[in-house]
Image (tube, coloured by chain):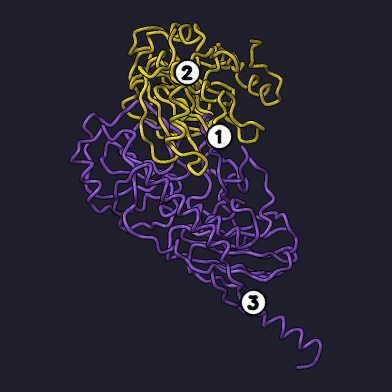
Chain colours: A purple, B yellow
Amino acid sequence: MAIKILEPGFNVTLQDYGRPKFQHLGVPVSGAISPILLRLGNSLVSNSEYEGGLEMRLMGPTFEVLCNSVRIAVVGTSTPIEIIDGGVVIQPANQSITVKKGQIVRIGNISDTGTAYLTIEGGFNLPKVYDSLSTYVRAGIGGYEGRALLAGDIISLNLSSVSVRGELKLNDTWFMEEGGPIRIILGPQDDYFSSSSIETFLTAKYTVTTETDRMGIRLDGPKLEHSRGYNIVSDGIVTGAIQVPGTGQPIMLLADHQTTGGYPKLGTVISADISRLGSLRPGEEVTFIQTTVGEAEQILSEQELKIKTAIENFKPADPWLDYQALYNENLISGFI
Amino acid sequence: MNRPSKNNSRFLLAGDSALVIQFGEVVDAAINQNVRKLAAIVKRENINGILDLVPTMRSLMIHYDPLCVSQSELKKRIVPLLGKGITLDDDINRWRIPVCYENEYAPDIEEVSKSLGVSASEIIKQHTSVELEVFMMGFLPGFPYLGLLPEIFDLPRRVEPRVHVPPRSISVAARQTTIYTIDSPGGWHLIGQTPVDFYHRERRNPVLVKAGDKVTFFAINSEEYPSVRRALMADEYPLMMDC
């Protein structure tokens, strides 16, 4: 009951809901950077929404199926998946696929988004640390040996065969097309910035730099000036916080952020826009708009409804016609 | 008695999934006590939707699930709690932590001794003289901020931060002391090293201490260090005191 990693991709880690209940011990939340995608991916393969899946940024892995069969789904990208078994069969993303023993799945370059997920029916059979499978590489917590995947890793699964059912696909991919300004709520330290700096932040364009990882997205754009210095006595940090160090260039903090920090935080990205941050790639431009807590809550509950509807409206997907298998069978049984 | 109240606190916004109650903007033991008191009071209430309570030097961050509870509902539950009292010493552990203040274990002790104009042995004496309190956890998994140290430790951070601070290093600055838990950059002065892992990924509970715990350091010499470390690994070296 396992898959074997042949090519690891780039910094592919196992992620689930994360560890939001252990921040008081200094343990980062971690978990999926784009939780909506993980939830949809898991739903496509009949898992609970926050089962651990493989988070892929820039390049996905190539792996061989060692058990009877696995049902997988890649969500968040339109990059097709190659199934290699003698020949190569191309399969679309955003639907479930069943792959059999000995077949090789290749994801390759993911060029249309910052983050995509690969989920597997039944999930991975790995130990939880602080209630979570999520990998936090810096402290070697969770996932597969606390690190990103490497070639040769054999990762245990919870199922040896897929359940018998048809394949499912997403009816629409609205979550991949969400655009517009990123919505933020000012605070907790907006009073550490001049009002013209806040005005600048809310009107200017910022570019996602290559200094982007699971901890945060460093932005490049007009410098923000601190009105009361840039060292504060450390306080708590929430995912989506926009902190501004001495350079004046803002950083949006993502899932692996430190639990506390000593730079002023101008604002916080609303919960409903967190998944979008994961899709950002270096070079992309972003703008920001201010909103209120009340509006953010309204937007979140509407989004939640949209996710539920998307899951209820999964459509049957064409079963993958395994031409090679048919061909082999025909040769053996001797009729056409 | 010092207690969290409406008069010494204010709410700060931190998005739609966290709420901050701030008691001040400076390092101050009384401010920190109020933060931790409020954390204990809120915890006792078992409010639906709260995911975690993170006390820091100066404020409490309440992480919550906005799909379970709205911010205005949450605030309505918190406001009446400001003004309530609580005793903090209930659920804490007391630790006795060995530290080696010698040679390669204490790369900055000479420099600190020079800049403070006191001998290394005086620094060790002062660092081991008081029972310290864990003010907050943060920066790294299992990383405690302890204080307050005697006044001689009121020194600024290093001018040049280090890129790599080895795990288990004991550092001091601004009358506080910390223990690095994993290799990381750091700007405080390294005056010793403990053989104790305040974070160990293989341990069932990887993090050793929590905010509110009490810690007393005691000196061991560099010859003892390896054997203490071995005993700790074999789980044959008690660190906790009976409260």
Q: Quadrant of residue B238?
A: top right
Q: Chain of mark 3?
A: A
Location of the C terminus of chain A by quadrant is bottom right
In the rendered image, the vertical position of residue A95 relative to residue B40, given as above or below: below
Q: Is residue A14 above or below residue B147?
A: below
User: Considering the numbered disc 2 on the image, is that residue within a helix, a strand or a loop?
Assistant: strand
Q: Residues within 10 Å of mark 1 (few under 14, many from 20)?
A: few
Q: Is residue B175 above or below residue A9?
A: above
CA gap between label 2 and label 1 equals 31 Å
Chain for disc number 2: B
Dot 2 corresponds to which residue?
B146
Q: Residue furthest bottom?
A: A336
Q: What x and y, as percent, mark residue B157? A: 34, 23
Q: Amino acid at mark 2?
A: Leu
Circle number at residue A320: 3
Disc 1 residue type (three-letter)? Asn
Question: Left or right: where does residue A294 sit relative to residue A53?
Answer: left
Residue A112 is drawn in which quadrant?
bottom left
Secondary structure found at label 3: loop
Report the Cα–Cα distance between label 3 and label 2.
60 Å
Q: Label 1 belongs to which residue?
A: B48
- The residue nearer to you, when weighing A309 against B182, is A309
Q: Answer few, some or many: residues within 10 Å of disc 3's Cα (few below 14, many 20 plus, some between 14 and 19).
A: some
Q: Residue at x 43, y 10 (%)?
A: B2
Q: CA distance from mark 3 to mark 1?
A: 45 Å
